[in-house]
Image (cartoon, rainbow, N blue to C red):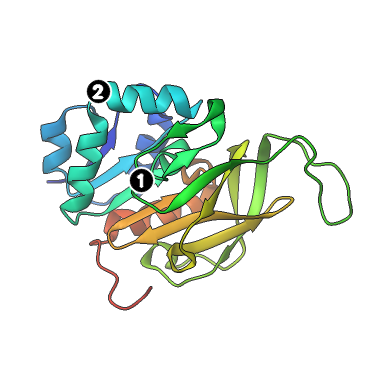
Amino acid sequence: MKTIAVIDYGMGNLHSVSKALEHVANDQQVIVTSDPEVIRNAEHVVLPGVGAIRDCMAEIRRLGVDKVVQENIASGKPFLGICVGYQALMQDSEENGGVDCLGQFDGHVRFFGESLVDEAGEKLKVPHMGWNKVKQTRSHPLWQGIEDDARFYFVHSYYVEAGQSDQVIGETVYGKTCHVALAHDNVVAVQFHPEKSHHAGLQLLKNFAEWDGKLDGKL
């Protein structure tokens, strides 16, 4: 049986992510694991994450998950980063005074700021918690069957500023334009929580579970 490995480094929303994947993954076993060999043998790999990036990166490095991530991305298998797992794939983050991340994407994680306002000048709350439309800026297998401007659920105080516009496949606006979905080769990553985003989120996870990691000219 093919497997989807959800990497457990003690900081992810593991139960919700794994249950959502189990709901949509046909004939695939979902395994929550920190075992490098199990992750290595899986056909799909997911890196979730919640909390402060400093603590996440400390555990990622302490447990050797950074090497596991690099190895699995290099193997060409489909790889998905979610929320802080998304931010961890960038070059660095402004959170906690500045933290070096995994550098899989040429992107930087920025703080929304204390005086974030909308187009009408009304103050916006930070962290950003709630539903926002996601504009699909590039076609990608991840978006199959999902309407443009579908709503996804967000919880974050920091946003990604991508270094390469051709890697951005989704944006949202919350006081400023935020790059909330990136893709490069066999790697996709999203700021929002697909496991908490009802039909659109489940469809995205289903698309990932069925994706072979190849783009076939769709990006």
Which residue matches tag 1?
A: 103
Q: Secondary structure at mark 2?
A: loop
The correct choice, above or below, for 87 with respect to 164 in the image is: above
- For label 2, count other residues whose C-alpha is less than 10 Å away and answer few (under 14), some (14-19) or many (20+): some
Residue at horizontal 28%, vertical 33%?
7
Residue at horizontal 42%, vertical 45%?
90
- For label 1, count other residues whose C-alpha is less than 10 Å away and answer few (under 14), some (14-19) or many (20+): some
Residue 175 image point, x, y percent: 74, 50
Query: Which label is found at residue 134?
Result: none
Q: In the picture provided, is 203 more to the left or to the right than 172?
A: left
The correct choice, above or below, for 10 with respect to 219 in the image is: above
Question: Hey, what amino acid is under mark 2?
Answer: Leu
Residue 69 image point, x, y percent: 25, 40
Q: Quadrant of residue 55?
A: top left
Q: Quadrant of residue 82?
A: top left
Question: Hey, what amino acid is under mark 1?
Answer: Gly
Which residue matches tag 2?
A: 63
Q: In the picture provided, is 205 more to the left or to the right than 33?
A: right
Q: Does residue 110 appear in the picture of this structure?
A: yes
Q: Earlier in the sequence, mark 1 or mark 2?
A: 2
- Separation of residues labelled 1 and 2 (CA atoms): 18 Å
Work out whether residue 189 or residue 164 is closer to the camera in this orientation and state it.
Answer: 164
Q: Secondary structure at mark 1?
A: loop
Q: In the picture provided, is 82 more to the left or to the right than 133?
A: left
